[in-house]
Image: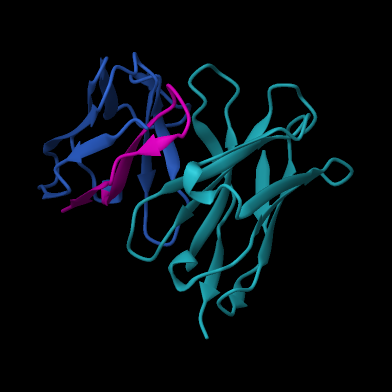
Amino acid sequence: VQLVQSGPELKRPGASVKVSCKTSGFTFTSATATISWVRQAPGQGLEWMGWISTSSGHTNFAQEFKGRISMTTDTSTSTVYMEMRGLRSDDTAVYYCARDNDSKYGSWDYWGQGTLVTVSS
Amino acid sequence: DIQMTQSPSSLSASLGDRVTITCRASQNIDNYLNWYQQKPGKAPKVLIYGASSSQTGVPSRFSGSGTGTDFTLTITGLQPEDCATYYCQQTFSTPRTLGQGTRVEL
């Protein structure tokens, strides 16, 4: 299993960013497959943003991000996308995609390498 | 939302020591508790899932215990490569929430 993310981004406040997560090594369209996005501000802890079902496209977002993020998939390339709008300086963080293990405990068993998004004027 | 509280926030221990990190949930989460290790500049790595099951390939010195609201991660015989930050995560409900992290130093 591999998750490979897109490269670093520098954005102005108010802009949007779209980060990709190309997956391989598992059945992307499995009914139980989900990918979560987790972010980590500099020197801070991990924060779950939401997940997407890679088979149905159903999403579940943390309240903090509702209305500001979207998650989509491209089944032809087994890629997941996370787009965030209205960027602020406190959105500066490393953004990770992670596979939710399909056991009942749903741990994040495989991770992307992370994408640094810097929001600065 | 379920709040996860770890203690301590940081600790310093000696080579070979037994290290214990505690995680408390704000409500009952049964055993829907996972532990992660993160080294600087790297993505986290799952160590323990379901409160006490070891992820494949994780050294046997790492163990987890607990159920309900109180959980522990124990490192028996601290090694230099164990210097990292450790996070607990609940998967009982959404939103998924994590503890604030425990930094382990030698």
* Residue A19 x, y percent position in the rendering: 67, 59
* Relative side of B64 to A4, left or right: left
Residue lying farthest to the right in this orientation: A76
Q: Could you say which chain is coloured cyan in the image?
A: A
Q: Is residue B24 visible?
A: yes
* Relative side of B22 to B1, left or right: left
* Residue B31 x, y percent position in the rendering: 35, 16
Scheme of image coloration = by chain
Q: Could you say which chain is coloured blue in the image?
A: B
Residue lying farthest to the bottom in this orientation: A121
A109, above or below A77, in the image: above
Magenta part of the chain: B83-106
B64, above or below B88, in the image: above
- Quadrant assignment, res A116: bottom right
Q: Is residue B74 visible?
A: no
* Residue A64 x, y percent position in the rendering: 47, 48
* Relative side of B40 to B18, left or right: right
Front-most of residues A49 and B16: A49
- Quadrant assignment, res B74: top left
Q: Give the quadrant of the N terminus of chain B.
A: top left
User: Residue at left 40%, top 49%?
Assistant: A46
User: Residue at left 55%, top 58%?
Assistant: A114
Residue lying farthest to the front in this orientation: A67
* Residue B90 x, y percent position in the rendering: 38, 29
Check residue B89 for magenta coloring: yes
Front-most of residues A88 and B62: A88
User: Residue at left 54%, top 57%?
Assistant: A95
Count of marks overlaid on the render: 0
